[in-house]
Image (cartoon, grey):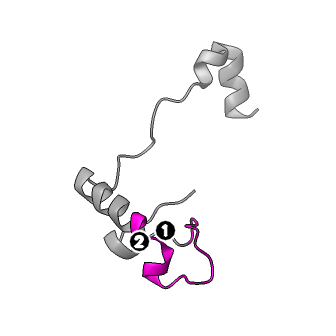
């Protein structure tokens, strides 16, 4: 039986609520501030001239801070 189904049977909807992030934040408050500033510069500043949207693949976290995130 799947774990979520067992939890539902034992504790109802309350047992399925999020208990918060699984892991601690990887970026400090200072790094988040820098990331926001860099994102405001836009994709063109980083060589993405063909499309002016940020995508998950283009986000700068790995490039700027050498930290990986997954979806």
What residue does disc 1 label?
59
Residue at the (49%, 79%) spot, across then down: 44
Residue at the (35%, 46%) spot, across then down: 24
Residue 68 falls in image quadrant:
bottom left
Q: Is residue 52 above or below residue 9?
A: below
Q: Is residue 33 above or below residue 3?
A: below
Residue 31 place in picture, x, y as percent: 27, 59
Label 1 element class: loop
Residue 11 falls in image quadrant:
top right
What residue does disc 2 label?
62
Residue 49 on the magenta span: yes
Residue at the (45%, 34%) spot, across then down: 20
Q: Residues within 10 Å of mark 1 (few under 14, many from 20)?
A: some
Q: Nearer the viewer, residue 69 or 59?
A: 59
- Give yes or no for contact between labels 2 and 1 (Cβ–Cβ under 8 Å): yes
Residue 51 place in picture, x, y as percent: 62, 77
Residue 3 place in picture, x, y as percent: 67, 32
In magenta, the rendered stretch is 39-57
Say which quadrant the C terminus sits in: bottom right
In front: label 2 or label 1? 1
Residue 25 place in picture, x, y as percent: 35, 49
- Please name the predominant secondary structure of the magenta segment in the image: loop
């Amino acid at each position: 039986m799947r774990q979520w189904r067992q939890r539902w049977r034992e504790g109802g909807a309350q047992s399925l609520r999020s208990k918060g992030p699984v892991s601690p934040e990887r970026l400090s408050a200072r790094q988040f501030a820098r990331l926001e500033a860099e994102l405001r510069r836009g994709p063109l500043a980083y060589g993405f001239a063909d499309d002016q949207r940020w995508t998950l693949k283009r986000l700068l976290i790995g490039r700027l801070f050498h930290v990986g995130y997954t979806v």
